[in-house]
Structure formats: C-alpha cells, structure tokens
Amino acid sequence: MSQAQPESRFLFPRWTNYLLPALVVAVVGGALYVPVVVGTGATPRTTDIGYMPTQPVPYSHAVHVGQLGMDCRYCHNTVEQAAFAAVPPTQTCMNCHTNIRSDSPRLLAVRESHATGMPVEWIKVHDLPDFAYFDHSAHVNKGVGCVSCHGRVDRMEVVWQVHTLSMSWCLECHRHPERNLRPVERVTEMDWLPEGDALEQGLRLKALYNIRDHKYLTNCSVCHR
C-alpha cells in the first residue's frame, strides 16, 4: 500500500516566486526607460532644431531681408490669403536678377530654371507632419509676427529651424496668444518691439482681432482635422 503524500507547505503556487524579481525589473526598467524616451524626444535631433539643409541656390536672407530690407511677402506672397507660405517662382528672382548680378555663378540654377521652365528644387525647412493643420493666413492676419515662429531670418545666411514646432510649443502660444501679438501691419518686421507694456498691448490686440479664448484655441480639432 502506497504512503499518503504529505500536504503542501506552500500557500501559493511556485510561479509566484518570480513575481518579486519581475516587479523589480519592471520598476528599474521603467525608471530608466521613461527618462531615456523623454530625453531623446526632446533632443534637437528629434525636434529638428538647427535643421539647415543646403539649398540648390545659396540664397541669403541676411542680405535680402536684413541689408536690403525686402518684405517677406514679396517672395512668400500667399501668407495673407492661404494656409501655406508660397515658395517664390523663378520669375520672382529674375525680376531683379535679370539686371543685378545676372552673370553670378551662384545664380546658375536660377538662370537654368528660367530658361527651361523647370522650378528650382528648394528644400523645405519648416515642415509640419501631415496630421497637423497650420494656416499661415490665420496667424498673420491676427498679428502673429513671422519672427515668432521662424526666428530672426534677417540675420540668417542659411535659413534654419529655430523652434521645435512641437505640439507643446504651439499650445503654449495658444494658451497665451497675447504674448506674441503685434499690429498686423508690423508682422514682417523682424526687429519690432512694442511700445509700453507688452502684455497690456497684447491683450488689447487680442480683443481687437477677436481672437478666441484658450479653451477654443487648445481644442484638438483646431489643429487636427
């Protein structure tokens, strides 16, 4: 006759012995994973701060805007009426360069474009993802200056991305638009500074331009349509 098996001395099944090590791994791993992910997501490489592609034509904003005083809208002539800021057609360049520095080797691609009718293949610097909707006209016509998003392009030999253009960066302005408002007729002036109290003027302009409150401006549907 076989002997009866002794009753188990354990209250829980053996697999529960692995719970504590698994919990330790999860806590330690999570403590490392979160800062690495957040830190990587905030680096300039990820946010594209400093992105400065080499363009097919070495166009200097520092010369054209800073020294010559050209208005942004001469080349980007759709910003007041459309969602996008148009890249100037070759003819816009040739309006001046037919007679000015017409033989410059730096303008070879412009001359070839003008002769063939094929556009210069400019590289977009400030490129938002397709799931984010941005309307230039809505901002420009409400007193948001070009410099608020693009930085001091009048000092740039080569245009580069100054800000993250991330959702959190946009939301910060949408929560407090008065901090970035100026008279509409001053939107393209890179060195414009408010007279008197900047916040007071911003609040006045916010009311003048009928800018909606932060609850509307931070609604998901405003930028994700």
Image: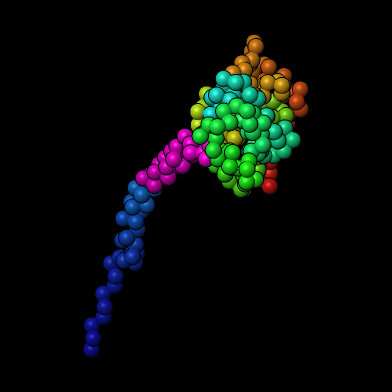
Write the start and end of the magenta stretch as one range. Answer: 32-59
Q: Is residue 53 left or right of residue 189?
A: left
Q: Residue furthest bottom?
A: 1
Is residue 220 visible to us here?
no
User: Where on the picture, by quarter, is residue 216?
Assistant: top right
Which one is in front, 20 or 34? 34
Residue at image x 67%, y 36%? 91
- Residue at (48% x, 38% y) in the render: 54
Please say whether residue 156 is one of the residues in the magenta stretch.
Answer: no
Q: Return the x and y of residue 59 as percentages of the image width and height.
A: 54, 32
Colour setup of the view: rainbow
Q: How many marks?
A: 0
Relative to 53, residue 97 above or below: above
| Residue 195 seen from this side | yes
Residue 43: say if magenta. Answer: yes
Percent of width and height locating residue 47: 49, 39
User: Which quarter shows the N terminus?
Assistant: bottom left
Residue 15's x, y, as percent?
33, 65
Left or right relative to 197: residue 210: right
Residue at 68% x, 21% y: name it.
186
Q: Which residue is pictured at 69% across the width and 39% down the height?
A: 83
Left or right: where 32 falls relative to 93: left
